[in-house]
Amino acid sequence: MPAFIAQAGVALAVIAAAYSICAALLLLRSHATPVAAGPERPGMSILKPLCGAEPHLMECLRSFARQDYPGMQIVFGVRDAADPAIETVQQLRREFPALDVALVVDPAVHGENLKVSNLINMLRQARHPVVVISDSDVRVGPGYLQAMVAALEQGGVGAVTCLYRGRAGSGLWSRLAAMFINDWYFPAVRVSQALGDRSFASGVTIALRRSTLDAIGGLQVTANHLADDWLICERVRRLGLRTVLSRFVVQTEVADEAFAAHARRELRWMRTIRTVAPLGYTFMFLSFALPVALIGLLLAWPSRLALFAAALTLVSRVAIHLEQRFRAAARVGYDWTLIPLRDVLLLLVWAAGFFGRGVTWRGRRYRVRKGGR
């Protein structure tokens, strides 16, 4: 094998080891207690767009209803009067009669992104100066809203977002999908943040002042965009304000679905990332540490340095998995045997992201243009 190919293999293995070690160390030191909020307690309106009776929906909504925060309003929205999520909201009202709840049933469409259309319809009922947008499958712990306020109170901050871990069901594909979130996505965001990237945004939580939302043009600017969460935070940054990642980590429910449903979701995520950050997407494969290390080892064989780097990568990769499983209160180590399959699938879905711009979302097919439109 030519020397330059062997040298490239060594470089790949070393890069993979460095990445995986950094990711593992960042995870180990990223569990600081959220900063306490100051004396200011601005009222908050939480917008919860709903669509169907999703698994664990009631448990997720209860976690918000139990937040100990004065001046909290929750606005739920559906597009169809026959949506079964309405009954879940009514049950929540019965369980928490003192909770300030608004339910908006409005089929009005404001663009191709039906979730954003739902949010636009809901926003009219929001009464407080701070708006928190959160997906329906999110579960939060105590102190969530206080953590959002603490981050938003920092000077120059225009929006706050959160990282999240996936809570898997019992099915194989649900567990693999949760590993996509926990073992790759979560550490990748930590590494990119450590390198100075501040473009991360997630629909699990975006908290911002109503005045800031108005200044970026309202939710209407995202009505025809797939990456609505990213675009909101990007517009905030264009105002000269910062978007920050809260120290608070929330949880999302990963439903037990067939392989095809999970594959379509991951492909949608990949192609969305590609449209908003094409250069970063091209080099994203370097974050797939274990496959990269093994490819490097094959190219550089029998290099001892490449073998050592690959071994370090493997140890760090398993450590990342165990750490995330522990933090998610899951059966620690149970899925470590799925790591090779998960990482191979990750590499394949990344490669598939280059071929085409079609995505499936809530049963509808879209073609995503540059910038996420």
Image (spheres, rainbow, N blue to C red):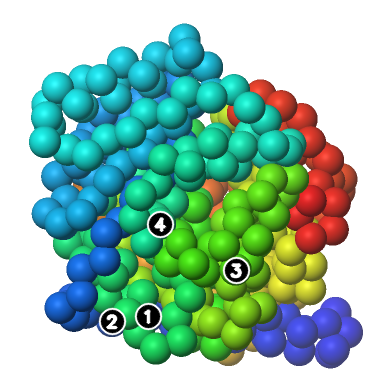
How far separated are the C-alphas under marks 3 and 1? 35 Å
Which marked residue is nearer to the observer: mark 3 or mark 2?
A: 3
Q: Position of residue 186 (x, y in %)?
A: 45, 64
* On screen, residue 173 above or below 37: above
Q: Nearer the viewer, residue 357 or 282?
A: 357
Query: Can you identify the residue that label 3 sits on?
Result: 215
Query: What's the residue at 29%, 25% (across, down)?
Result: 89
Which marked residue is nearer to the observer: mark 2 or mark 4?
A: 4
Which marked residue is nearer to the observer: mark 4 or mark 1?
A: 4
Q: Nearer the viewer, residue 162 or 347?
A: 162
Q: Label 1 near label 2: C-beta < 8 Å?
A: yes
Query: Can you identify the residue that label 2 sits on?
Result: 29
Query: What's the residue at 14%, 22% (across, down)?
Result: 94
Q: Secondary structure at mark 4?
A: strand
Q: Label 4 near label 2: C-beta < 8 Å?
A: no
Q: Is residue 48 left or right of residue 94?
A: right
How far separated are the C-alphas under marks 3 and 4? 14 Å
Q: Label 2 near label 3: C-beta < 8 Å?
A: no
Q: Position of residue 177 (x, y in %)?
A: 48, 43
Query: Can you identify the residue that label 4 sits on?
Result: 131
Query: Can you identify the residue that label 1 sits on?
Result: 26
How far separated are the C-alphas under marks 4 and 1? 30 Å
Q: Is residue 292 left or right of residue 103?
A: right
Q: Secondary structure at mark 2?
A: loop
Which marked residue is nearer to the observer: mark 3 or mark 1?
A: 3
How far separated are the C-alphas under marks 2 and 1? 5 Å
**Nearest to N terminus: mark 3 or mark 1:** 1
